[in-house]
Image (spheres, rainbow, N blue to C red):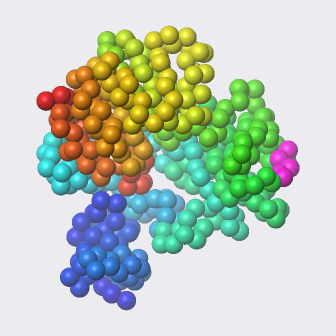
Amino acid sequence: MEKIKIDEIGFNGEGVGRLNGKVCFVRFTLPGEEAEIEITKNKSKFCEARFVKLLKHSEKRAKPLCPYFSVCGGCDFQHMAYTDELKAKQEILNKQLQKAGINIPIKVNASKKEYFYRNKLKLFFDRGLGFHKAYDSDILPVENCVIAEKEIGSSIAIISNFLARYKHLPSQVEIKLQEGVLLVNFCSKKNIKLEIDELSALLPPSQIFLTTPFSTKLLKNASSAPEQDPNVFHQVNSTVASELYHKVVAKAKEKVVVNCYSGAGLLSAMLLKGGAKKVFGLEKGLNEHQEAEKLKKQNALDGLVNIQGDCAFTLPKVANEAELIIVDPPRAGLSEKVRTSIDSSNAKELVYISCNHATFARDVASLKNFCLSEIEIFDMFPKTANFEIFAQLSRK
């Protein structure tokens, strides 16, 4: 065992101290605390550790709502008050930007729900449905999840008990709540047989699917709602996503917009209905593109052009028409080709939405023809170290 004093919060929400001359990262600890720790990873320049016992508590330490906290790896910040969590996230982003040579005030928008906000979960089965543990890849079975919407959390034990009777199990289970309908997607590497009538009767209005590498099959539709695609990406915090999107829509009025990484087309539709002159929606995923086309047809969005393909290849084809470019890339950020296309476009403004502060700072610093003029945090993921960034950049 080793002893350590925690000095600050790290980029991933962990406590940071120094041990034998090395930086040491300790999850679930706070600045000012002292702890007994056990080293879990020892590298030449840093180490990682799990805290075994707190020797000195911070006055800001709060009691977690979840009984699984610090064993489950899903949450980072249940041991601090929400106001302190928001300050920590602001400081994390500020330090990341300063590393990239950027100094700018950061506005923080809190989530209205501190708990019970997530509209989707991904779980794994090992003696019960659960999540990966904090310090290894083992599965921790859980009966509920306090950051998930209550209809989702209360369904975990029901689905877990249902699966316990089977020998051949799905590799993971995805549970979503969309427009009052529970989407339960059993994801399997091969076809498996599930008798789901009893399960359907125990759940709220539900659509139950089986997804294999070859297809997605609707097993049961216990609601009158139209069938939805469970594999299409949606933001996990509906309220914060709506606030973020309305911010973006306000920037797009009377402009020709290229919306990169446009997903199932919700933001593209909002942009057009909110006053954009024309919108190009660029999306690589075929399922998402097809959903965007359905949305376009259902809402008669004649000013929307959805293009399916990688933004690295589709953006250059429409970049000269853009007055505003919007990017909402995956965590890996923008490729060099996309950054080059943005720089060489005719767009005068760029809106960058990001869930990864490291790749965001890298990308913003590497753009040659744009400078950061406005930045805000939208706390899409309370109780975790993650957050969504809204940034506006203007052409130099």
| Residue 220 against residue 300 in the figure, above or below | below
The residue positioned 68% from the left and 67% from the top of the image is: 126
Quarter of the image with the C terminus in it: top left
| x, y percent for residue 365 | 20, 45
Quarter of the N terminus within the rendering: bottom left
Residue 364 x, y percent position in the rendering: 23, 42
Can residue 9 be seen from the camera position used here? Answer: yes
**Is 100 on the left-hand or right-hand side of 25?**
left
Task: Report the predominant secondary structure element of the magenta stretch.
Answer: loop
Residue 256 sits above or below residue 139 on the image: above
Q: Position of residue 292 (x, y in %)?
A: 55, 25
Residue lying at 33% horizontally and 37% vertically, measured from the top left? 338
Q: Quadrant of residue 246?
A: top left
Residue 362 lies in the magenta stretch: no
Identify the residue shown where x is 40% and y is 83%.
38
Residue occupying the point 51% across, 72% down = 136
Magenta region, residue range: 193-197
Whether residue 111 can be seen here: no
Q: Is residue 54 left or right of residue 375?
A: right
- Between 226 and 232, the one lying in front of the other is 232
The image shows residue 17 at horizontal and vertical percentages of: 25, 74
Residue in the foreground of this view, choosing between 359 and 116:
359
> Closest to the observer: 306 or 174?
306
Residue 125 location, quadrant: bottom right
- Work out whether 359 lies above or below 132: above
